[in-house]
Amino acid sequence: MALRTISVGDIFNADVPTGGTVICLALAVTATRIRARDICRQGELLDFDRHTGVAPWPRSKIGTTCTITSIAPLPPDVHEALLGLDRKYNRGRPLTTEEMKLTEAEKKAFVFVYDYHAANRI
C-alpha cells in the first residue's frame, strides 16, 4: 500500500470534503498512524490512519475527515521551499509584516504543488 512509504519529513497532500487541500509534513510515523502538521495552519495537527489515509479534520464540529490524496515526492527545490515555509510559520511567535510575505520560491512551490498533487493522486 502506498501509505506505507510515507516517512518522517515527507510532504504529502490531503483533501477535505469541502474542496480544500492541506499540505502536510509528516512528523511521526508508526505502524498504524501518521502524525502530520498542516504547513499553512501551524496549529493544525492531523493524525492519519496509516491504512486508510483518513484523519479527523480538527476544524470540524460535525465529524468531517480529511484524506491523503497524494504522496508523490516533490522536486528538491519545492520540498525545501515548503520546509522553509514550515520553519518560518513554526517560530512560536507572530510573524512581522515582512516575514509574512511569501518569497518567490514559496510562491512557485505553492503553484507547483497544487497542480502536481492533483496530477499524482493515489
Image (cartoon, rainbow, N blue to C red):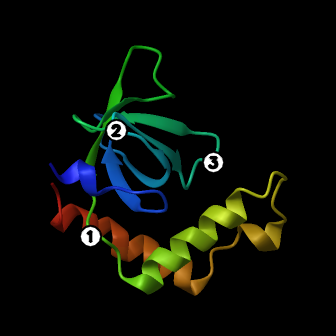
Side of 46 relative to 112 (left or right): right
**Secondary structure of residue under mark 3:** loop
Mark 2: amino acid: Ala
81 relative to 84 in the view: left or right = left
Residue 31, numbered circle: 2
* Tag of residue 115: 1
Rendered location of residue 44, percent (x, y): 57, 39
Residue at the image point whose x is 49% and y is 46% from the top: 36
Q: Helix, strand or loop at disc 1?
A: helix
In the picture, measured across the screen, residue 84 lies left or right of residue 73, that is right
- Kind of residue at disc 1: Asp
Q: Nearer the viewer, mark 3 or mark 2?
A: 2
**Residue shown at the point (27%, 39%) measured from the top left:** 53
Tell me the distance, in whole angstroms, between the alpha carbons under discs 3 and 2: 25 Å
The x, y position of residue 95, in whole percent, is 81, 61
Figure check: 56 above or below 103: above
Residue that numbered label 3 is attached to:
42
Q: Label 3 neighbourhood size at 10 Å, few (<14), some (14-19), many (20+)?
A: some
